[in-house]
Amino acid sequence: MNQIETYIQGHESQFLEDLKSWLRIPSISTLPEHAGDVQRAAEYAVEQLKRLGIEHAELIQTKGHPLVYGEWLQASNKPTLLIYGHYDVQPVDPIELWDSAPFEPSIRNGNIYSRGAADDKGQVMVVLKALETLFKVNGTLPVNVKVLIEGEEEAGGESIEHYIKTYPERLGCDAAFICDTHMPSPEVPALITGLRGIIYTEVIVQGAKQDLHSGTYGGVAPNPLHALSIIISRLKDADGHIHIPGLYDHVRKASHEEKSFWEQDPLHMDEAFLREMGVSQLSGELEYPPLERVSARPTLEVHGIVGGFTGDGAKTVIPAVAKAKISMRLPPDLKSKEVFKLFEQTVKDAAPSGVSVEVVNLHGGEGVLVSTDSPVMKAASAALEEVYRTPPVYLREGGSVPIAALFDEVLNVPVVLMGFGLPDDNLHAPNEKYSLQQFFNGIRTVASFLQKMA
């Protein structure tokens, strides 16, 4: 580890420059005008794999954005680790809230600011630089590795799901490693033991065949914006309870240990939530502790509403169409396709008369729970303790990484969810950042993890 530390310290500038070059590519997978940028980001990842010594690095073309694959299988009689990450990023809106250009990485206050810095280019680069360090110091890797990096994680992940289900034998491994999660603080390392699934929908309400003058038709015309507001109000009440019949029937009760941890809140996450959000009180189901609400309970959130006139000044129009983007986060026992059917029926039942409603399932994915008892999880725990000088906590995370459930279901291997993001990294928001301390500690930890796994 002394040689590894020397190499990392001697190459910090190079590591950051390689990350910056990747971050400058605006690989926004959901916007068609950035398809070329997504391709360039994938090609950059292939070049990084080739430079550090991974064999057979290549692009795998799909119906959507390409996958990046590489493997190094020369560690005889050693386990094989499948490493996953994604190179696509979220859109940057609202651009005016960024303090620096989202695709021109800026370093300040010990952080690197850029879209994709923490989600997930910075975290993938942690793993790639750990591999490079091991190659340069030892001339080899302690375990066999397969690397799979996708470009549609922020856009539903259909291509990688199809690939994994079609070619599971190519991805055969002893364990999978996903570096796309966070820690409670720089002093408290964590291993994630659970993720929620997701459905992301668009609700479209149609009224008249065209926009109408409110003076001429007001009082008799259906208003899709009003109808949409009624629908949303009937889906979830002011106390955070979701009114979708059958939704809560299959939510698994937490273990006594988890429940005690959530209630005692030894990390003082209640206070951290208030501070990070800048609010005076927490919302949601008050009968459940906040840690449980953000990690193990179903949620329903409205992300955007479009319809009618939203420009400056006045325009007395009754819109013909209104749309809402609505998602749900799902504990592991709630399956996305089944929940979508319940959601769709509830939305249609909640609609007032006079309008038609369409519910579109934009994408979905499953949640997962992982065991803490596997040898690979113990290796990850030991590596975190070695670098951070304290044992990691085991947490569920409220976000969704559907690939974890796929690895669990299709490859039937233990999944290690070990990332180095922080709660205030502004994921999916303006001024996304990644702590430089976490970046370099992540490299140290992953290098140690691979050695301990061997």
Image (cartoon, grey):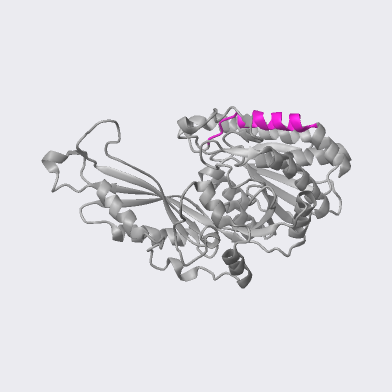
- Residue 337, percent from left and from top: 47, 59
Question: Does 247 appear above or below 184?
Answer: below
Q: Residue at x 67, y 41 (%)?
A: 124
Question: Does 23 appear above or below 399?
Answer: above
370 left or right, relative to 311: right
Q: Quadrant of the N terminus?
A: top right
Question: Does 266 appear above or below 76?
Answer: below
Q: Which residue is drawn at 52% across and 39% down?
A: 90
- The answer to whether one can see residue 399 in this image is no
- Residue 88, percent from left and from top: 57, 38
**Camera-side residue of 449 and 186:** 186
- The answer to whether one can see residue 365 in this image is yes
Q: Does the magenta stretch include residue 14?
A: yes
Q: In which quarter of the image is residue 266?
A: bottom right
**Camera-side residue of 186 and 31:** 186
Specify start and end residues of the magenta stretch as a single range.
11-28
